[in-house]
Amino acid sequence: MRRLKANVEPEEAARILTEVPSDKAFHFYKELDVPIGLVARSLKELITIIQTVEAKSIEFHVLRGDLEKWVIMLGDRSLARQLGRMRRLGVKDAALRQRLVEILTKRYEALKDSI
């Protein structure tokens, strides 16, 4: 996988990669009001969960823009824009999971490399 530059200052990259408190964590749902008990407190945890969580949960969050909003909260508008493109393209099922893992992993590695 080709390494990309994060184009952020080391302090900003570190802030984006920091584990957030429980009240700011990303909670996965299957559908509205149906949590599945999986929680990501960091970008790294988000990647790990997306690799195994059921596709219905991923699609639910992508269609609502939840992932975009969460990474904006982390401070990463660039990643949010990439995730927004996935929503607008209407990618689904295994292709959606694969593409999300690829996008998130590339960004995570770029941020990590810039610290």
Image (cartoon, grey):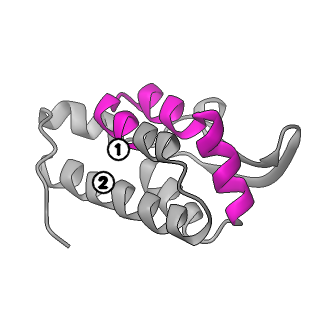
Q: Quadrant of the N terminus?
A: bottom left
Q: Which secondary structure type mostly characterizes the magenta part of the structure? A: helix
- Mark 1 neighbour class, 10 Å CA radius: few under 14, some 14 to 19, many 20 or more: many
Question: Could you give the CA–CA distance between mark 1 and mark 2, rounded to whole angstroms?
Answer: 8 Å
Q: Is residue 62 left or right of residue 95?
A: right
Q: Nearer the viewer, mark 1 or mark 2?
A: 2
Secondary structure under tag 2 reads helix
Q: Position of residue 8 (x, y in %)?
A: 15, 34
| N-term-proximal mark, 1 vs 2 | 1
Residue at left 46%, top 68%?
A: 98
Amino acid on which the number 2 mark rests in the picture? Tyr
Q: Are marks 1 and 2 in contact (CB under 8 Å)?
A: yes
Asked whether, in this view, residue 38 is left or right of residue 49, the answer is right
Residue displayed at 83% across by 47% down: 35
Q: Is residue 106 left or right of residue 50?
A: left
Circle 2 sits on which residue? 108
Judge whether 53 appears above or below 19 on screen: below
The range drawn in magenta is 55-82
Q: Secondary structure at mark 1?
A: helix
Q: Which residue lies under the disc numbered 1?
A: 17
Examine the image and state in which quarter residue 57 appears: bottom right
Taking the magenta stretch, the answer to whether it contains residue 102 is no
Name the residue: 62% across, 71% down.
Answer: 52
